[in-house]
Amino acid sequence: MSTDRISRFERRFRHLPHWEELGAAYFVTFVLRRPPVVALTDPGVGRLVVNALRFYDGKRYTLFDYTIMPDHVHLIVKPVVHGDGAERLPRVIRDLKAWLGREINAMLDRRGRVWQDESYDHILRNEADYWEKAKYIYENPHRKGLVADPAQWPWWGRGSGAGTA
């Protein structure tokens, strides 16, 4: 890796390290607080999450693959690069979680935090890395014993960038 590429990274820490690179695609996981207030796979909540993920596709990020699990969400996204800069992954994920948290709370007629503060993110380094994470996302419901065949999982999907990373 060239030192020029390294100089373009931004590194942040909370509990987990976070690396950010302009134009990079990311594998992201965000998780409900413990104990979970709801199963994300309840039909109304699942549709809400899918609609939110798809709403930002093409506006703030390109969405590749996603799956919604009972207590967490996995997705592959690439923040949009504008002529005057780029969407920042931490802000995009923060805004997505904040909106979903408000909507989930309204749906459940409750108050309080819905998500764990920090999300996990991993920069996809190359096409092989993308396909590895896409396969992980697709197979996650089967690995967790939720379906016999991953194709049966109703909360898996692909966005406008699927298969093009």
Image: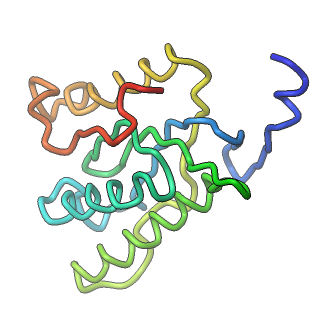
Q: Residue at x 29, y 38 (%)?
A: 158
Q: Residue at x 54, y 64 (%)?
A: 94
Q: Position of residue 146 (x, y in %)?
A: 15, 35
Quarter of the view holding residue 106: bottom left
Q: Position of residue 29 (x, y in %)?
A: 46, 44
Quarter of the view holding residue 25: top right
- Which residue lies most toward the top here? 128
Please state which of residues 15 and 124 is positioned toward the viewer in this rendering.
124
Quarter of the view holding residue 104: bottom left
Side (left or right) of 17 relative to 147 = right
Residue 50 drawn above or below residue 154: below
Q: Position of residue 73 (x, y in %)?
A: 36, 47
Location of the N terminus (image quadrant): top right
- Which residue lies most toward the front here? 83
Side (left or right) of 140 relative to 9 = left
Q: Residue at x 57, y 55 (%)?
A: 118
Please state which of residues 122 and 15 is positioned toward the viewer in this rendering.
122
Side (left or right) of 34 relative to 39 = right
Residue 87 drawn above or below residue 158: below
Residue 104 drawn above or below residue 115: below
Q: Position of residue 151 (x, y in %)?
A: 13, 28
